[in-house]
Image (spheres, helix red, strand yellow):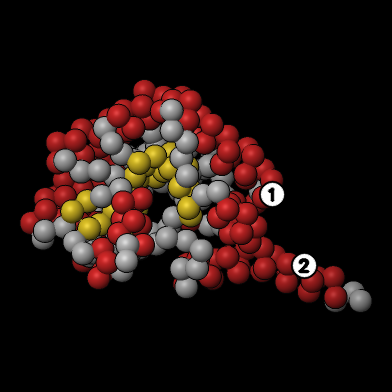
Amino acid sequence: MDNLIPRLLIFLIALYMGLPFLVTRIFGWGVFRKASRKRAERHVAFTFDDGPDPRYTPKLLDLLRDRGVKATFFVLGSKAEKYPELVKRMHEEGHQIGIHNYTHMLNWIMSPRNIRRKHVERSADIIQRITGERPTYYRPPWGILNIMDLFLLRKAYRLVLWSVIARDWKLNTGEHHLRNLLSDHIRPGAVIVLHDSGDTFGADREAPGQMLTVLRDILSETERRGLKCVRTDELLMLERAT
């Protein structure tokens, strides 16, 4: 009996945390990570997490506007509340806006009720008040879900992860390595995650500046390769097309 309780706790923790990590990251069940190359044709989706940021997001929006690129921003509700003009600009310039929690907290350490009410729904309400449109796409911080998220949030939101991640949140990745990582892994159907804010845990505050420098080159390269950048919802529509 003494050994049963610790074993049961370990089992429950593994079920709550480990199972959704396994099925989403390895098997892609219940989430959208990429479109098939055949269905995506020449399309890719750039996504940006952790903003809006008053220093870097305007520069990013300028770059996307100048290149004629549409993207998806997974924003933090607290930042959307603080910088509504940036969220409004995203919407007015044709970008998709998704939810990235109210603050950048790990879903593993919160109850499903708190995640849904205090993070997801709260952020959706804020974005809807700013744009007039309610977001239906959700990416959890660090791409980590718990077992209840996987079943409950899927009823109202499309859960989105990524197929290309390049450690752009750290300055020591370096421009050269970051550029090579993106160039080598971006292919038709890819969902690329980058970060337009560097003030979350584990990130370097100046890292988005490095990301923007590299992104200019990567957008030029994708254009030369005949790839078209679209919103995540548009890429998903291509994936679902018969």
Taking the image as shown, residue 87 lies to the left or right of residue 135, namely left
Q: Position of residue 117 (x, y in %)?
A: 64, 39
Residue 164 in sight: no
Q: Position of residue 186 (x, y in %)?
A: 23, 62
What residue do we see at 62% from left, 54% from top? 152
Q: Nearer the viewer, mark 1 or mark 2?
A: 1
Near mark 2 (Cα within 10 A), the count class, few <14, some 14-19 or many ≥20, is: few
Q: Position of residue 180 (x, y in %)?
A: 20, 62
What residue sits right under mark 2 in the picture?
9
- Give above or below for 104 relative to 36: above
What residue sits right under mark 1 in the picture?
111
User: Closest to the observer: 128 or 242?
Assistant: 242
What residue do we see at 30% from left, 48% from top? 231
Q: Which numbered disc covers residue 72?
A: none
**SS under mark 1:** loop
What residue do we see at 85% from left, 76% from top? 3
The three-letter code of the residue at mark 1 reads: Ser
